[in-house]
């Protein structure tokens, strides 16, 4: 008899479950992609107690879900806005930098920048900043948006 509770399998999206008090014995297929979710229990009792057949059915169900819902490409991710985004444009923000004076450590000056960031290659991040003092808020924001768009055009899949 398998151990009680949940245990990991080598297959993504498939978890072995054994909760006899709830009647849940088998495999849980659980995944989320492209705002779609699957949460389905494949019961071992439907396979006459054969754990191997049950596992193969769970693997097939998970594989089918992943084929129907592929991962986002890096280009698609650049267009998705998250909940925490406040600017309305992904990868562009107003950033505040504090610079301390060497002559007086208690004294500091605050500078505001419009910052654009993008990832031209996997594992690399590029940033470009434009001073609000130098360009003005609207122009700095426009320049940051343009810099990000140019960077995204050079991005490889």
Image: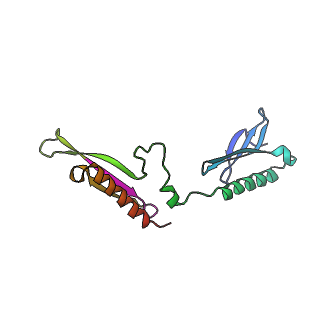
Q: Nearer the viewer, residue 13 or 72?
A: 72
Q: Percent position (x, y) of residue 96?
A: 29, 45
Q: Percent position (x, y) of residue 117?
A: 38, 56
- Which quadrant would residue 146 be assigned to in this image? bottom left
- Residue found at the far top of this picture: 21
Judged left or right of residue 31, residue 105 is: left
Magenta residue span: 112-123
Judged left or right of residue 157, residue 143 is: left
Q: Nearer the viewer, residue 71 or 27?
A: 71
Judged left or right of residue 29, residue 88 is: left
Q: Is residue 19 visible?
A: yes
Residue at 51% of width from left, 56% of height from top? 77
The stretch drawn in magenta includes residue 122: yes
- Residue found at the far left of this picture: 103
Q: Is residue 108 above or below residue 121?
A: above
Q: Nearer the viewer, residue 19 or 33?
A: 33
Q: Percent position (x, y) of residue 53?
A: 82, 53
Residue at 36% of width from left, 55% of height from top? 116
Q: Is residue 126 visible?
A: no
Residue at 68% of width from left, 44% of height from top? 7
Q: Quadrant of the N terminus?
A: top right
The stretch drawn in magenta includes residue 136: no
- Residue found at the far front of this picture: 138
- Residue found at the far right of this picture: 48
């Amino acid at each position: 008899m398998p151990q009680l509770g949940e245990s990991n399998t080598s297959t993504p999206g498939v978890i072995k479950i054994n909760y006899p008090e709830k009647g849940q014995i088998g495999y849980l297929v659980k995944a989320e992609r492209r705002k779609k979710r699957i949460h389905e229990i494949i019961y071992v009792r439907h396979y006459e107690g054969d754990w191997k057949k049950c596992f193969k059915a769970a693997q097939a169900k998970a594989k089918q879900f992943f084929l129907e819902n592929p991962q986002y490409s890096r280009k698609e991710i650049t267009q998705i806005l998250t909940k925490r985004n406040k600017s309305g444009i992904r990868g562009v923000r107003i950033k505040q930098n504090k610079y301390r004076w060497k002559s007086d450590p208690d004294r500091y000056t605050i500078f505001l920048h419009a910052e654009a960031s993008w990832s031209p290659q996997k594992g690399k991040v590029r940033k470009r900043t434009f001073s609000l003092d130098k360009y003005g808020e609207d122009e700095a924001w426009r320049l940051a948006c343009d810099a990000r768009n140019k960077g995204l055009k050079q991005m490889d899949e």
